[in-house]
Image: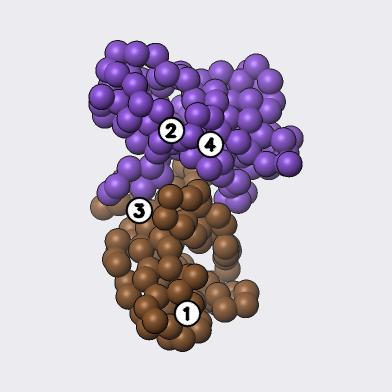
Amino acid sequence: QKEVEQNSGPLSVPEGAIASLNCTYSDRGSQSFFWYRQYSGKSPELIMFIYSNGDKEDGRFTAQLNKASQYVSLLIRDSQPSDSATYLCAVIMGTASKLTFGTGTRLQVTL
Amino acid sequence: DAGITQSPRYKITETGRQVTLMCHQTWSHSYMFWYRQDLGHGLRLIYYSAAADITDKGEVPDGYVVSRSKTENFPLTLESATRSQTSVYFCASSHGLNTGELFFGEGSRLTVL
């Protein structure tokens, strides 16, 4: 089992729809969770972080965390073509206290 | 401009040659990291450094050497390049080890023939 798992996609959503990106992690002691966005040929950039169970909203982005289910998600409302990118889930694993990345989900927003 | 810069951006070399990838940051961040990114594996940590002269292994350190004589520089050396080291290499920096907020350089695409 990978430590941080994401569906590689591509996830295709029409412009204006809600994109839902999911991530599961193996270490129940993990405390900190991050979403990075990576455009093709570019470097990753941090867009959201969440530490507590529940939802955290920032503009069109909402991060959701469910520690009991070891599940973190990113919702993108009113998806735009400029949101087309790979989204990397990253977790600070509780046991090793190191940041571990998932392999990313490629999102395509279609016109 | 403040930031983190990598050089070279693109490099083609041959098996067995030594290659050094450079990384320079102007934020005065304590921590610096080297990752490689490959299809199907995502970002994997090679080495990191907490301060000048303090380095530690990450998940995939074999075949790589790092040094950090100055806080702002963190070069990565492949002493004898192998085809399996063909990858995109990202340098990153942060305030701390477990902040989760990494600032990445633009990446160095290395091809080993």
Q: Nearer the viewer, mark 4 or mark 3?
A: 4
Q: Is residue A96 left or right of residue B72?
A: left
Whether callout 4 and callout 2 share a subunit is answered yes
Mark 1, residue position:
A79
Q: Nearer the viewer, mark 2 or mark 1?
A: 2
Q: Which chain is purple?
A: B
Element marked by disc 4: strand
Residue B44 at x, y percent in the picture: 40, 40
Q: Nearer the viewer, residue B80 or A27?
A: B80
Mark 4, residue position:
B91
N-terminal-most mark, 3 or 1? 1
Q: What's the distance in space between the residues labelled 4 and 2, CA to CA?
A: 14 Å
Element marked by disc 3: loop
Q: Nearer the viewer, mark 4 or mark 2?
A: 2
Q: Chain of mark 3?
A: A
Tag 4: amino acid? Cys
Q: Residue at x 28, y 22 (%)?
A: B82
Q: Chain A drawn in what color? A: brown
Q: Nearer the viewer, mark 4 or mark 1?
A: 1
Tag 3: amino acid? Thr
Q: Nearer the viewer, mark 3 or mark 1?
A: 1
Whether callout 4 and callout 1 share a subunit is answered no
Q: Nearer the viewer, residue B22 or A90?
A: B22
Height in image: A30 above or below B43? Answer: below
Mark 3, residue position:
A103
